[in-house]
Image (tube, rainbow, N blue to C red):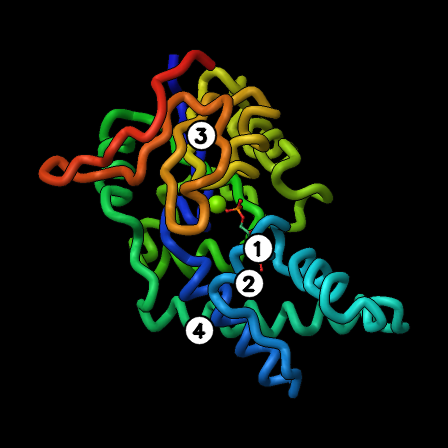
Amino acid sequence: PLAALVFDVDGTLADTERDGHRVAFNRAFAEAGLTWHWDVARYGQLLRVTGGKERIRQYLSEDWPDLLREPGIDARIRALHAAKTRHYVALLETGAIPLRPGVRRLLEEARASGLRLAIATTTTPENVTALLQATLGAEGVGWFEVIAAGDVVPAKKPAPDIFHRALQALDLPPDACLAFEDSDNGVRAARGAGLPVIVTTNGYTRDQNFAGALVVLDGFGEPDAPATVLAGPAPV
Ligand code: XBP
Ligand code: MG
């Protein structure tokens, strides 16, 4: 029987990438006196690599390969990323990024029906609590029994590790859970750990391949504005 819902954060609970993470990266770059700037399209390409530090490294390998060979580059990336987290959390605290439509209702209905809630995400833990705090309030942070996030596992999505971690903390088998994801990397991670997964697409992910998903929707929807089914139901 279904016991828990396991949510991705970025792109799933909220559209955080284009107007959140991307903006925070650019603020960190500018603050460090760098000319680097990620526009919306470039950021979409860089999103193929999950994890902020990993994404900066990917950008350097493409645009500034010589920098990657400089001594101290790892520490520099870590410092840039710490600044990016600071800018991102500050942006969330202004209330700039709302939950996607239907998310609050889904969480409330799940809780009312006795389902446990968990998070499995690539992003930094403080980003998760800042988003939940800004949108659901302090009480909402406590709705999630498990928050598996960021560098607690060495391999980020599409590796299944963060889902394994969440399952372990929930002490549940994968088939007692249902994952919610917005991206192909997320679907691969969830399926890799054996969880059935529902996809809610967004602007950056709608053309991706969601093979293995139970169903692909364009959002969670609301009773008076239902989401569109883009694919499925298909057998898992
Ligand atoms: C989210 C990510 C993250 C965020 C940035 O992927 O890829 O890298 O963009 O987070 P998913 P950090 O939704 O699949 O978990 O900068 O904190 O790493
Ligand atoms: Mg996501």
Horizontal side of residue 93 vs 228, given as left or right? right
Quick one: 87 or 47, which is closer to the camera? 47
Residue at 41% in and 26% down: 4
Between marks 2 and 4 in the image, the one whose residue lies nearer the viewer: 2
In the drawing, what numbered circle is on residue 42? 2
Kindly identify the amino acid type of the residue bearing the numbered disc 2: Arg
Q: CA distance from mark 1 to mark 2?
A: 5 Å
> Are circles 1 and 2 on residues that touch, CB within 8 Å?
yes
Between marks 3 and 1 in the image, the one whose residue lies nearer the viewer: 1
Which residue is disc 3 drawn over? 179
Kindly identify the amino acid type of the residue bearing the numbered disc 1: Gln
Residue at 50% in and 61% down: 41
> Are circles 2 and 4 on residues that touch, CB within 8 Å?
no
Kindly identify the amino acid type of the residue bearing the numbered disc 4: Ala
Which residue is disc 4 drawn over? 90
Dot 1 alpha-carbon crowd within 10 angstroms: few under 14, some 14 to 19, many 20 or more: few
Q: CA distance from mark 3 to mark 4?
A: 28 Å
Q: CA distance from mark 3 to mark 1?
A: 25 Å
Residue 143 picture location, percent across and down: 35, 42
Horizontal side of residue 9 vs 64, given as left or right? left
Which residue is disc 1 drawn over? 45
SS label for mark 3 = strand
